[in-house]
Image (spheres, rainbow, N blue to C red):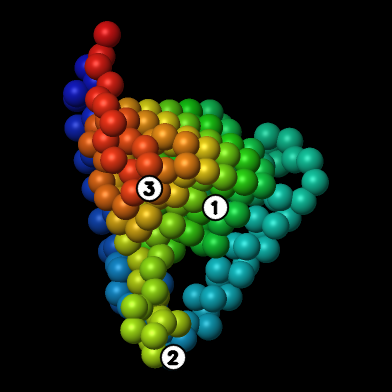
Amino acid sequence: MNDSNKRKERKQVFSTERENQRATPNDIFARDLNGEMVSPNDAGYEELIADIFATMKTATEMNTGYRTSEEVHGFMGRILGKPLDGSTTVLPPLYIDYGKPVTIGKGCFIQQCCTFFGRGGITIGNDVFIGPKVNLITINHDPDPDKRSATYGRPIVIEDKVWIGINSTILPGVKIGYGAIIGAGSVVTKDVPAMAVVAGNPARIIKTIKNK
């Protein structure tokens, strides 16, 4: 199978995963994942926050002291609510608020001190490299100052073989295409095409990677 067909296949997988995640009952968890505004006044909000704090407690346990690869995979399975593939490496500490809407593919390498705000949904493809101190942020606040405690999510999708440089921030709703490179310290505010190299704040395309 050539790279073009592989990319098409992965796109279908990403689409199916998002549809499956959204096909949940219409409770606050589903509303949160579907990008609807949720407020501390909403029914079920306390349950949502309790689930988030339970995730953060597990992450804190993982981040405390030295952990073997097997131990990290065990903790990540609890955080994600599904197994982390054995070919993927996560180096603690990892700061994550909510893991159930997060999917991490095979052969990934996630460096230390990354922050994942996962409530809006994060999909990471195969063979993705994520440098230290990278922030994946899927949640935003109501711009109205009188309602700013309310939040809404937008999913982040990172396709196969993406490389995200140290101290970069990916903002809500961004999709990073196959093979793209995000330069160190970038703030990515909009979609990145496949095989593009972007850098800066806000990140802009500086070149395109040519296949040899």
Query: In the rendered view, does 73 fall on the left or right side of 103?
Result: right
Where, by quadrant of the figure, is residue 38 drawn? bottom left
Q: Residue at x 62, y 41 (%)?
A: 112
Q: Residue 166: give x, y in percent of width and height.
A: 52, 38
Where, by quadrant of the figure, is residue 90 drawn? top right
Marks 3/2: CA distance? 35 Å
For the image, the number of numbered tags is 3
Q: Earlier in the sequence, mark 3 or mark 2?
A: 2
**Residue 201 shows which numbered tag?**
3
Q: Give the secondary structure at mark 2.
A: loop
Pick out the residue farthest to the right. Answer: 65
Residue 25 visible here: no
Q: Which residue is mark 2?
A: 41
Q: Residue 203: give x, y in percent of width and height.
A: 33, 44
Mark 2 residue crowding within 10 angstroms, few (<14) / some (14–19) / many (20+): few
Query: In the rendered view, does 139 fall on the left or right side of 19?
Result: right
Marks 1/2: CA distance? 27 Å
